[in-house]
Amino acid sequence: MITLDGFFEGPNREIDWHNVDEEYNQFAAEMLDSLDLLWFGRVTYELMANYWPTAAAVTDDPIIAEKMNSKPKAVFSTRLQNVAWSNSTLIKKNFIKEASKMKHTTGREIGVFGSAILGNALVEAGLVDEIWVMVNPVVLRLGRPLFSDGAERLNLKQISSRMFANGNVLITYQPVVREKNFWQRLFQARRPAMKRPSRVEV
């Protein structure tokens, strides 16, 4: 979920602007059915782990709650010491190496939920095949952008879109690796080098 101006949460981590209805819930259920493994950064994991196992979640949204609680999950965090949410695995170091191993050896469909820091690191490492962006019809003007500063421009190819009755628009992209032309290589050679982070803190 992002706003029209590109934020995935408000300046105080607000997500009360999420535009959710029955059509969206049906989409969410179908999406979860298509995934074998869920990946989270620490903040999103704690948010989910503190809600979906509760009686309120099971009562208000039993279908999604059952899927979220039963799906295998991995959380990437240097700060967490343990995880209690059912079917969760904690990855504490070598995030990119471990993510690459899971992606290329399990053959499972993996989805990253929220978790912008983790998501950006995975995109930078070339481990993301598709980016699903659900644009909500709201402008926050302040907040945390989905895409953080990176070493290089991210080129995308749109492969599908879907409009929801409530005004949401789902756009699916694939990252595109483009060969640089002469002028792009020359410009990049003259720019000060931007250092990639040596590790991801989540």
Image (tube, helix red, strand yellow):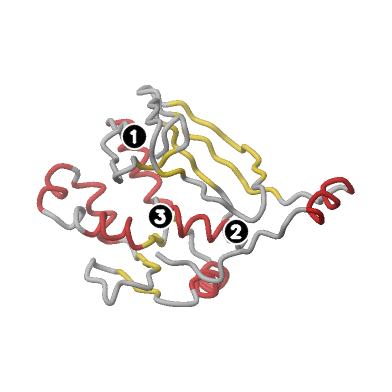
SS for tag 3?
loop
Q: Quadrant of residue 92?
A: bottom left
16 versus 72 height, above or below: above
The residue under label 1 is 24
Q: Quadrant of residue 156?
A: top right
SS for tag 2?
helix
7 versus 113 height, above or below: above
Instruction: Check disc 2 and give the amino acid type.
Output: Glu
Quadrant holding the N terminus: top left
Residue at 64% x, 47% y is: 154
Near-viewer residue (57 or 4): 4
The residue under label 3 is 115
Question: From the viewer's perspective, is 54 left or right of 186?
Answer: left
Residue at 60% x, 58% y is: 124
Closer mark to the observer between disc 1 and disc 3? 3
Among numbered discs 1 and 3, the one appearing first in the sequence: 1
Instruction: Check disc 1 and give the amino acid type.
Output: Tyr
Among numbered discs 1 and 2, the one appearing first in the sequence: 1
Mark sitting on residue 76: none
Residue 133 image point, x, y percent: 48, 40
Question: From the viewer's perspective, is 20 left or right of 92?
Answer: left
Q: How many marks?
A: 3
SS for tag 1?
helix
Residue 110 image point, x, y percent: 47, 59
Near-viewer residue (134 or 64): 134
Residue 137 image point, x, y percent: 40, 25
Question: From the viewer's perspective, is 1 left or right of 124?
Answer: left
Among numbered discs 3 and 2, the one appearing first in the sequence: 3
Mark sitting on residue 124: 2
